[in-house]
Amino acid sequence: MRTDNRQHPWPPQDRLALCDEAKGPDGFTKQWKNAMGYEIFSYFWPTTHAEPKGVLLLLHGHGVNVPFEFLTRSGVGKERVYEGSWIQALNKIGYSCCGIDVQSKGRSGGFKGYKNYFESFEDVIADDFAFIEKMADLGGDKFSKGLPLFPFAVSMGGARAAMMILRNESVFKAALLYAPMLSLERVSKQGLNPYLKPLIAMFNAIGPTWRLATASKNDVFPDLQEEFDNDFFSDQGQTRVRLASEYLKVTEHIMANLKRITLPVATFHSEGDTMVDPEGSRRLVAEASSEIKVHEDCPGSWHILINEPGNEKTLEKTIAFLNRVNT
């Protein structure tokens, strides 16, 4: 058991700058303080279209950060890059892209300098909504509130998107979810997790920052796992007790309220995903009250759909869905 692997201060201020290859020709970053006083790091990649079609709100997953999740690979230990990325492709067809690193993840600050820790998922959702309110002021007219807004969410980002939709669906035009963390039933049965789950309330009370819960390794694409293992701003440790507890609570809430979702939604998931349960995606599309709802299988993939082999087909389906719902 590892009880604490803080790096003080997190994030290290001398490492915050995003390289030019990651920004691309027009991208930029901004920092702002959330309601808790933490410095939140935000990223903007505006389209060059004179009349933008909309804004994609980039919602990253557990243990990673916006650039690592949404930009394209450039080698082990190297920062991911804009050229050849989904963001570049989506910019080219008229969509601006932006997002924040969740507090204590990536380049954002958080609770007492812990890496990859927050006290409540509600704090994360509050930051997401605060960013939406600040988006135009921080990013400029290509991120105007008048433009259609789409959650563009990966893994734990899918839970962020679902919680925001359940809170205030009218903010969004439609949602795109990639291997979303909507259900953790399969994960809760892996490793020591079946033994930890009944004790989670006790551990949450006495050691919320302890690292106990295990996560799957990417054995399908070990080269991608190696890149994650060597990414400075990602977190390779076991999941902290408080986060595991919050994830279980949030996913149970989402699964119990799928029928309340009425906006157009597309999910992309692989049956080979051992990180989160693909059944959550299937149930969302089966149970949501949306008139337009699509579930796309991603055969041969694992969990990192945006960077795994065959992602070009997933991008094509993504663009087709955007064209369908944003006419």
Image (cartoon, grey):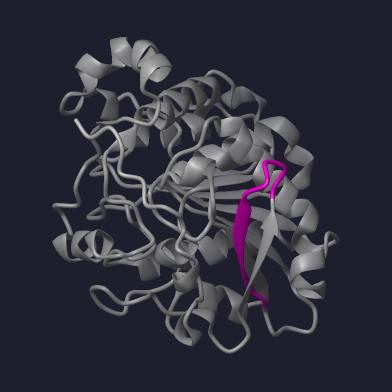
Instruction: Report which quarter residue 146 is drawn in.
Output: bottom right
What is the x, y in percent for residue 265?
A: 59, 44
Instruction: Report which quarter residue 256 is drawn in.
Output: top right
Question: Camera-side residue: 98 or 31?
Answer: 31
Question: Camera-side residue: 302 or 9?
Answer: 9
Q: Residue at x 75, y 35 (%)?
A: 168
Q: Which residues are magenta?
A: 34-46
Q: Residue at x 61, y 48 (%)?
A: 175
What is the x, y in percent for residue 278?
A: 35, 37
Question: Camera-side residue: 237 or 90?
Answer: 237
Q: Residue at x 51, y 37 (%)?
A: 159
Q: Residue at x 20, y 15 (%)?
A: 195
Please say if 205 is above or below 19: above
| Left or right of 89 on screen, residue 186 | left
Q: Is residue 186 visible?
A: no
Q: Is residue 320 visible?
A: yes
| Left or right of 260 on screen, residue 212 | left
Question: Camera-side residue: 52 or 63?
Answer: 63
Please say if 27 is above or below 181: below
